[in-house]
């Protein structure tokens, strides 16, 4: 079955600290992988995507993610978080010629001053 | 700004009523997908329209229906509203069938009372 697991419902980090959000997926085809961010009451903004090629992808706002096929993971990282990074983060998986994107349940990021 | 616009932004309906939500896709995109996001959950795929034809459907009952117009804008219609239909409805536009990433609108918050 196709699925995305984000094991951490909430994560709290101090401003300036590093961040890693975990994502594991189960997908039959070669996956396309995404990270989206959602501020309260807002739509989804694409942070970064992996379609093929280099397994370390850079995104907006200083985020990066690494695709590890052997671990079926696509973890999101940022070396130093800012208070404005507080939001909900969703990992998602799709595929070429597939009709849908499957989302995880999200990780809520809290930033301590 | 993704160029995907949804209307209205908020809506309150009574159980049993019908509702129509609208989405204008980003310029150059010919595919529109609709997602339902219940409170505290990740988005769930409702259906996708590609070049005015339904291209795929998630696990939603037939009272959820849609249209795509020649300009690639789209409508989501929900009949016989139930309390559990209260959610944020997100529209996403893309090019082709899973060829590119999807860009999301800000969503329509539907409350059924």
Image (cartoon, rainbow, N blue to C red):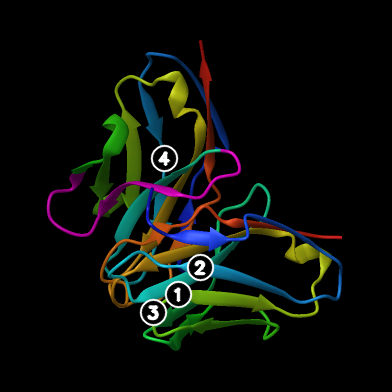
Please name the residue that numbered disc 2 is placed on: B23
Rendered image quadrant of residue B4:
bottom left
Query: Relative to residue B60, is residue A108 depicted above or below?
Result: above
Q: Residue A81, percent across and down? A: 38, 21
Cα–Cα gap, marks 4 and 2? 32 Å
Q: Residue B79, percent across and down? A: 75, 80
Cα–Cα gap, marks 1 and 3? 6 Å
Badge 4 sits on which subunit?
A
Cα–Cα gap, marks 3 and 4? 39 Å
Cα–Cα gap, marks 4 and 1? 35 Å
Asked if labels 1 and 2 touch by Cβ distance under 8 angstroms, the answer is yes
**Disc 1 secondary structure class:** loop
Q: Report the mark closest to the observer, 4 or 2.
A: 2
- Is A47 one of the magenta-colored residues? yes
Q: Which mark is residue B36?
A: none
Badge 3 sits on which subunit?
B
Cα–Cα gap, marks 2 and 1? 6 Å
Query: Relative to residue A2, is residue B3 depicted above or below?
Result: above
Cα–Cα gap, marks 3 and 2? 11 Å
Q: Are marks 4 and 2 on the same chain?
A: no
Q: Is residue A20 left or right of residue A40?
A: left
Single out the residue that lies furthest toward the left. A53
Q: Are marks 4 and 1 on the same chain?
A: no
Please name the residue that numbered disc 3 is placed on: B71
Badge 2 sits on which subunit?
B
**Disc 3 secondary structure class:** loop
Comes first in the chain, label 2 or label 1: 2
Rendered image quadrant of residue B25:
bottom left
Q: Which residues are magenta?
A: A40-56
């Amino acid at each position: 079955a196709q699925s995305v697991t984000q094991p951490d419902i909430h994560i709290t980090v101090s401003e300036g600290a590093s961040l890693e959000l975990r994502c594991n997926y189960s997908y039959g085809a070669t996956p396309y992988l995404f990270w989206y961010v959602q501020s309260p009451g807002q739509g989804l903004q694409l942070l970064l995507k992996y379609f093929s090629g280099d397994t370390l992808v850079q995104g907006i706002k200083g985020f990066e993610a690494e695709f590890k096929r052997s671990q079926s993971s696509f973890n999101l990282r940022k070396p130093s978080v800012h208070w404005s990074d507080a939001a909900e983060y969703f990992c998602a998986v799709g595929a070429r010629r597939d009709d849908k994107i499957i989302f995880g349940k999200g990780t809520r990021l809290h930033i301590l001053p | 700004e993704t160029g995907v616009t949804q209307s209205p932004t908020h809506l309150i309906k009574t159980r049993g009523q019908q509702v129509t939500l609208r989405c204008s896709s980003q310029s150059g995109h010919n595919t529109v997908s609709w997602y339902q996001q219940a409170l505290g959950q990740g988005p769930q795929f409702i259906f996708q329209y590609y070049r005015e034809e339904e291209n795929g459907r998630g696990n939603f009952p037939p009272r959820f229906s849609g249209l795509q117009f020649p300009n690639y804008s789209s409508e989501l219609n929900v009949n016989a509203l139930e309390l559990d239909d209260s959610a944020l409805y997100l529209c996403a536009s893309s090019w082709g069938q899973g060829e590119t990433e999807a860009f999301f609108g800000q969503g329509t918050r539907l409350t059924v009372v």
